[in-house]
Image: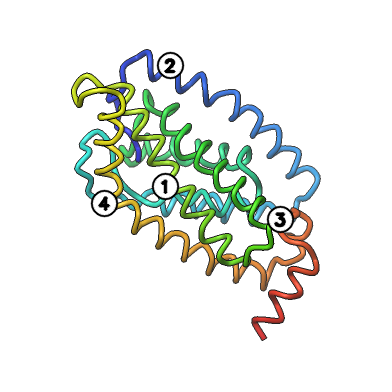
Amino acid sequence: MHIMEGQLPLIWSAFWFAFSIPVIIYGIYKLNKLVSERREVVPLIAVAGAFIFVLSSLKLPSAVTMSSSHPTGTGLSAILFGPAITSVLGVIVLLYQALLLSHGGLSTLGANTASMAIIGPFIAYIFYKSASKAGMNFYLNVFLATALADLATYIVTSLQLALAYHGDYGSYLESFAYFAGIFALTQIPVAIMEGALTALIMKYVIQIKSDTLIDLKVLSASAVTRLKETME
């Protein structure tokens, strides 16, 4: 997903920075507010950030030479803390990866932030909340929300590349289909594996941090009780 340094025209780099910066500013406000009100969540925030860093650093070969394929790890944070805070964790990870791992780039940081740290987590959060209200099984909900965040990230990346390079691959739609089709070969199985891993991690979080999940309104007290009963 990480679009490499210098692979977007200046106008599109500027556009995605303009899109991402207001969300990051709002996310910083939300993060500061959460930490000041609930200091006990700091270790969980750190775990969520580390999860994003580790998973999104696992680069896989991709036929799209301007980018790469990998898990995103943002679904867990989106479910726990919402998309705004996740955008802050995501941009920190992307910045470190660009500077230390040559994974992505500074000129493409806005575009990579938009796809992986903003839109993907937003999709996960909306799906999780909607499915929770509809009464979906919790673990299935986490699995699908996480997988959708992953896939949404690559759909947005495909759009970003299509907008920048449509002349080389036909029309905008043809260009989008070209990039999305290539990403799908690796990303669909990756999204499934990431969804399953995140669901397993959430089972562990319920066991050790159920009170925090209730405080964050991720789960109700009754839902936590039911889930713990199924573990016995």
- For the N terminus, the image quarter is top left
Cα distance in 3D space between marks 4 and 1: 12 Å
**Which mark, residue 192?**
none
**Which mark, residue 151?**
1
* Camera-nearest label, 4 or 2: 4
Furthest-bottom residue in view? 232
Which residue is depicted at the point 47% across and 41% down?
93
Q: Amino acid at mark 1?
A: Leu
Residue 156 rendering spot, x and y as whole percentages: 41, 35
Q: Amino acid at mark 3?
A: Lys
Earlier-in-chain disc, 4 versus 2:
2
Cα distance in 3D space between marks 3 and 4: 33 Å
Cα distance in 3D space between marks 2 and 1: 24 Å
Q: Which residue is mark 4?
A: 185
Q: Which residue is mark 3?
A: 133
Q: Amino acid at mark 2?
A: Ala
Q: Amino acid at mark 4?
A: Leu
**Label 2 Cα crowd, 10 Å radius (few <14 / some 14-19 / many 20+):** some
Q: Which residue is mark 2?
A: 14
Circles 2, 1 touching at the beta carbon (< 8 Å): no
Which residue is depicted at the point 67% across and 86% down?
232
Cα distance in 3D space between marks 4 and 2: 30 Å
Cα distance in 3D space between marks 2 and 3: 38 Å
Earlier-in-chain disc, 4 versus 1:
1
Circles 4, 2 touching at the beta carbon (< 8 Å): no
